Image (cartoon, rainbow, N blue to C red):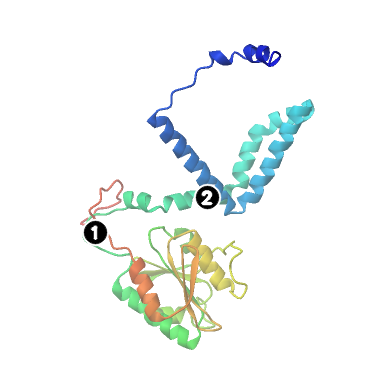
Amino acid sequence: MIYIKPFLDSLHLYDISLPTIGITDILDILIVAYIAYKIIFWIKETRAWILFKGILVIFVFAFVALLLGLNTILWILSKTISVGIIAVIVVFQPELRKALEQLGKGKHITSIFRADAGSEEGTFSEKTMEEILRACGKMSHEKTGALMLIEHDVPLGDFERTGIPIDAQVTSQLIINIFEHNTPLHDGAVIIKNNRIAAATCFLPLTDSNDVSMELGTRHRAAIGASEVSDAFVIIVSEETGAISLARGGVLYRNISIDTLRSMLSQGNRHVKKKKIVLWKGRRANE
């Protein structure tokens, strides 16, 4: 203790005053901790986790260089850090875009910026749903492969632009004719929005998930991929077995019946009683 006491006195620990912590400080810490947790959880669920571990290796290497006094390496790292920030943004661009899309798809954000004024309505009408179900039943019986997206809150304009514009009323006969074998429009996806067939032969992104069964083909993988980046109802009819499946939110519900599909579409169809405060609206309903 005789030798330790002078050392502790030299640190002037007695002059250090503890900061006061208030309610706002605790709230600030909790918010930052929650954001950090969500970021780490999001990174671990994507390919960015491997890249993130690579960046950690670089930081560890820089720390070792600092301890050993490797000035040349430290100089190189200090000069390239500004370029490195831009490189990180470029490397993580798909993951950052996906994170922003998920943030924008949040229920609270969507409810604020949606044009809600008028009577109760849904994403699609009962007639449209019945025409889709009738077509699915017919194509399932005849084992005609099909892939349909029903737009919900997230616009599908990026997918729609990859196909051929149709802009026709939704009828079971038209849907069946589009997916008929050896027809010009049968390959690709059909996009349905505003109770109309907007486009056909649309290209969809394949899912990057490793949990997808190997027995699933390109049609099902594209359906899962489209449901991961949007909140659309994605209906699939298998060409090999005639089984009907529904993809929503990155989850594939396989081998469902027409009645189950009807129930899932009805429950997921948005019905808003439109009593919300409107912050953004393109046109009024009566214009």
Helix, strand or loop status at disc 2: helix
In the image: residue 99, left or right of residue 279: right
* Near-viewer residue (180 or 62): 62
Kindly identify which residue carries mark 1.
273
Which of the 4 quarters of the picture holds residue 8? Answer: top right
Tell me the kind of residue under disc 2: Arg
Q: Is residue 9 above or below residue 192?
A: above
* Near-viewer residue (250 or 144): 250
Q: Which mark is residue 97?
A: 2
**Quarter containing the C terminus:** bottom left
The mark lying in front, picked from 1 and 2, is: 1
Residue 176 x, y percent position in the rendering: 44, 81
Tell me the kind of residue under disc 1: Lys
Q: Would residue 169 be seen by someone viewing this image from the given angle?
A: no
Count numbered badges in the picture: 2
Residue 134 x, y percent position in the rendering: 37, 82
Q: In percent of the image, x 57 and y 49: which residue is there?
A: 43
Q: In percent of the image, x 29 and y 73: which residue is there?
A: 126
Q: Is there CB contact under 8 Å for labels 1 and 2?
A: no
Q: Would residue 250 be seen by someone viewing this image from the given angle?
A: yes
Helix, strand or loop status at disc 1: loop
